[in-house]
Amino acid sequence: MLNIIRPCIANRIFHDGYISALNEYLKIVPTPLGMQIDYHRVYRTVADIDYQRELLNSLLATPAPQVAAVAAGHAPEATTERKVVSLKTISKNFWRHL
């Protein structure tokens, strides 16, 4: 979603695709924006988008917690490896521009 948002910020074009991508992104990532959002001010510069991307990538670089077996002698089910990030690990600087 940041890949959709970035060129819109760079060109200052806030069309329906931008608003849709921003809404989807804000549903996933916790934000201190309140209920009414001025979509022109969520990201002011491309540097803000790049900063967000760097922070998200750094969170994915940390190992995901291992799920313990529920009953003794049972191994967890085999699943495709999925990156999981705890939102508690997001630093206070994540939204530095707000």
Image (tube, rainbow, N blue to C red):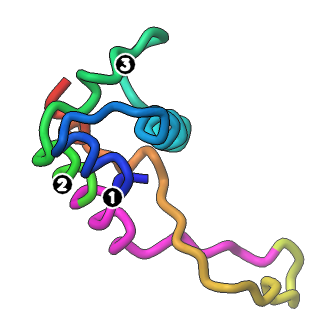
Viewer-proximal residue among 86 and 26: 26
**Is 66 included in the stretch rendered in magenta?**
yes
Q: Quadrant of residue 74?
A: bottom right
Q: Which of 4 and 30 is in front in this view?
A: 4
In what quadrant of the picture does the C terminus appear?
A: top left
Residues tagged 1 and 3 counted as in contact (Cβ below 8 A): no
Answer with mark 1 or mark 3, whichever residue precedes in sequence. Answer: 3
Q: Mark 1 points at which residue?
A: 56
Report the amino acid beneath label 2. Answer: Asp
Q: How far apart are marks 1 and 3 (CA)?
A: 18 Å
Q: Which of marks 2 and 3 is in front?
A: 2
Is residue 55 part of the magenta span, yes or no? yes
| Span shown in magenta | 54-69
User: Along the horizontal axis of the image, is 80 left or right of 17?
Assistant: right
Residue at mark 3: 33
Write the residue at 22% across / 60% down.
54
Mark 3, residues whose alpha carbon is within 10 Å: few (<14), some, or many (≥20)? few
- Give me the residue at 89% from left, 76% from top: 71
Above or below, comparing residue 40 to residue 91 in the picture: above
Query: Which of the two marks, 2 or 1, is nearer to us in this view?
Result: 2
- The residue that disc 2 covers is 50
Q: Which amino acid does label 1 sit on?
A: Leu
Q: Where is residue 10 in the image (x, y as percent from the top left)?
A: 16, 45
Question: In the image, 14: left or right of 52?
Answer: right
